[in-house]
Amino acid sequence: MQDLWTLKYRAGTLKEMLGNEHAVATLSELTQSGTLPHLILYGPENSGKTTASLALARQLYGSTWKNNFAYFNASDFFDQGKRYLVRDKRFVRMLGTDDPKKIYKSVIDIFKQVINEYAGMASIDADYKLIYIDNAESLNSDAQHALRRIMEKYSATCRFILSTTKPSKLIAPLRSRGLQIFFTYVPDSVLKAHLENIGCAEKLQLSEGALDAILYSAQGNVAKAVQTLQLVSMLAPGSVVTDEIVFEATKSRDENLDNLLSAALGGDFSRGRQLIDEMIVEKGLSGIEILEGLSEALADSGETDEDVARLIVKISETDARLKDAANDRIQLEKLISNFS
């Protein structure tokens, strides 16, 4: 089985990070000072927050970094719930069962138990360890308040890194306990050089147009660009990868998005809600990704220019609300309830 290039070519150190020079410089200075505070890393999805945190752990702990770094995904806890918990071997011992029907504690109680246990165990070979919580915006208010108290209680034994695409969803007391560092997508010039290096290492033949097409599709998203490069390399083994091949590889769209558009245009709110739930819960799409796909589906729908323009305005208004919304699903349901 071929290795995933997003992992194979992921930055291993802070110096290897692409773009985000200010964020990287801040993290480097903190590691050198020996006074690392709790951190809140915020910015769009796949902008380097997790990669930077892993690199930070390697820089702090060297070869023992895995013993001092714990990763938790808040969306797994609170969006998938007990179905996820029984699949993660770390939690079976705490739960005493691998059957979700036999778990009688609430998800938030389990979350508090897990974080308390990990935070309370002091590092053997370091002053403190790191606990990284990805998609922290998925934590509800009660979970955030509980986390704030845990951060205060165990500040001597661990540092927390919270990663989020929506910092406004974090309660003020939680935001105030961490240094906020912004991440964003990388410039095309930096990303293009990275793709060229990967292409060289993998002995790919890439046309200039192919790289430009990948950059256009990725829009600065490193993970998406590298995934696309790997995909097109498999579609054209031994031959030159052209912009036409890239276009064919990236033009596909989740059929649920077309079905969602049909349901919204037809006023089928029940079907629309079901499709939104499938895309968010089962496929892990964000509200922004669903809106982007819905906009593309609308452009290809054959509706009149006047109708497309009118509906794009509604999509853009929902996009603006999502930036400060506490729940993507509610905003998407509001959109389709008054779409046609």
Image (tube, rainbow, N blue to C red):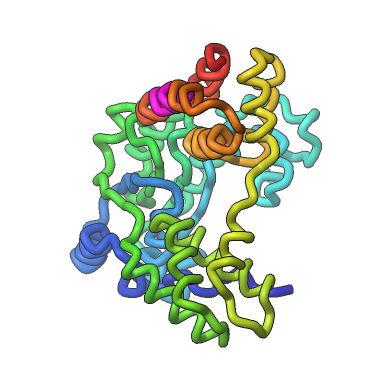
Q: Quadrant of residue 277?
A: top right
When the figure is inspected, residue 103 is found, relative to residue 50, above or below; the finding is: above
Q: Residue at x 34, y 48 (%)?
A: 41
Q: Is residue 316 magenta?
A: yes
Residue 118 visible to the viewer: yes
Q: Nearer the viewer, residue 252 or 112?
A: 252
The x, y position of residue 267, in whole percent, is 64, 13
Q: Residue at x 50, y 33 (%)?
A: 291
Residue 68 visible to the viewer: no
When the figure is inspected, residue 296 is found, relative to residue 340, above or below; the finding is: below
When the figure is inspected, residue 4 is found, relative to residue 309, above or below; the finding is: below
The part of the chain drawn in magenta is: 311-317
Name the side, left or right, on which 284 lies relative to 10: right
When the figure is inspected, residue 43 is found, relative to residue 321, above or below; the finding is: below
The x, y position of residue 84, in whole percent, is 68, 40
Name the side, left or right, on which 258 lies relative to 197: right
> Where's the N terminus, which quadrant?
bottom right
Q: Nearer the viewer, residue 289 or 167?
A: 289
The x, y position of residue 328, in whole percent, is 50, 27
> Where's the C terminus, which quadrant?
top right
The x, y position of residue 167, in whole percent, is 34, 36
Name the side, left or right, on which 210 lies relative to 168: right
Q: Residue at x 62, y 60 (%)?
A: 249
Q: Nearer the viewer, residue 302 or 270?
A: 302
Q: Please, what is the dominant secondary structure of the magenta stretch?
A: helix
Q: Nearer the viewer, residue 25 or 273?
A: 273
Q: Residue at x 66, y 42 (%)?
A: 254
Q: Is residue 251 magenta?
A: no
Q: Quadrant of residue 175?
A: top left
Name the side, left or right, on which 259 lies relative to 37: right
